[in-house]
Image (spheres, helix red, strand yellow):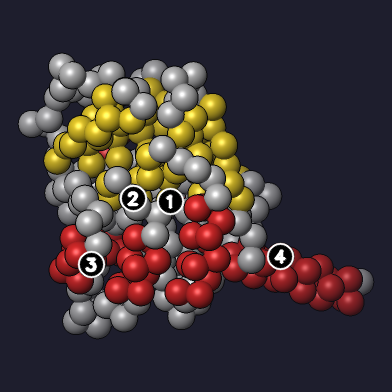
Amino acid sequence: MAYLLILLAALVGIWAVAEAHWVLRVVHHQIGSRGVRILFVSDLHCSRFHPPARIDRIIRRAEQLNPDLVLLGGDYVERGNRYVDRCISQLARLKAHAAVLGNHDIQTHRGENPRSAVVAALEERGIPLLNNTSMMITVKGIHIQIIGTADARRDIAYAGHLTRDDRADMLILLSHSPDFLPSGAGHLDLDLALCGHTHGGQITLFGRPITTHSRYGRILGRGLCTYRSTPVVISNGVGTTILPLRFWAPCAVDVIDL
């Protein structure tokens, strides 16, 4: 019996390492029929556990998906400045149309805060950063307004001054944490919200998150859900935090067809 338990523990450990480092799912969400394809990439957490070489493999996979619009959901690095430039350089290959910051991008660790380095790297590579701001973009003749917020947990996320543009055929909210939806997006007439942060639970009980690092628990925990009639995609993301492991919450990029 002891041998079986040891074997089971070993298999679980191998699976958890594989999910965190070698498995990458492309999760497709069919939400509309206008012919616009969005690629959403979030939570890379570039670090010694998720080095630039691994990010390169993820980007190469993402490049094959032929998106019309590429949006980035924050947490590009795990902590500090060491991997900022190399991570953003890899992401620049996707020619992203907009990005927001996550809590790890603005979190001080051992006296080092990566915010200014991340902001500078995005700007240098021509990736627009939305920080409680809005932008318009036209894709296949469709006018899409994107509202991007600061991180809702470690920064001041606010969209009270923003409304749907009269020209917009579609309004998308880009927010690192799904916690912004209940607290600050109630006045917005959204067509879609894109969030990350939760990692799908990262380590789950066979798909049931133990924790999501969201104030709203499993309600805004993972995957495609609906909040006040708005479709919300909460990505598992592609990196890890604290432990370099995943269990039944595989790394993922999300493709949304609108």
The residue that disc 4 covers is 15
The residue that disc 1 covers is 41
Question: What residue sits 15% from the left and 43% below the top?
Answer: 132
Q: Secondary structure at mark 1?
A: strand
Measured in 3D between alpha carbons, the distance from the residue under mark 1 to the one under mark 2, in whole angstroms, is 10 Å
The residue that disc 3 covers is 121
For the view shown, which residue lies furthest in the front direction?
140
Around disc 3, counting alpha carbons within 10 Å, would you say few (fewer than 14), some (14 to 19), or many (20 or more)? Answer: some
Residue 28 visible in the current orientation: yes
Q: Give the mark nearest the N terminus, 3 or 4.
A: 4
Measured in 3D between alpha carbons, the distance from the residue under mark 4 to the one under mark 1, in whole angstroms, is 23 Å
Q: Secondary structure at mark 2?
A: loop
Q: Are marks 1 and 2 in contact (CB under 8 Å)?
A: yes
The residue that disc 2 covers is 96
Around disc 4, counting alpha carbons within 10 Å, would you say few (fewer than 14), some (14 to 19), or many (20 or more)? Answer: some
Q: Are marks 2 and 4 in contact (CB under 8 Å)?
A: no
Q: Amino acid at mark 4?
A: Trp
In the rendered image, the quadrant that contains the N terminus is bottom right
Return the x and y of residue 171 as percentages of the image width and height.
Answer: 28, 26
Return the x and y of residue 104 as percentages of the image width and height.
Answer: 30, 64
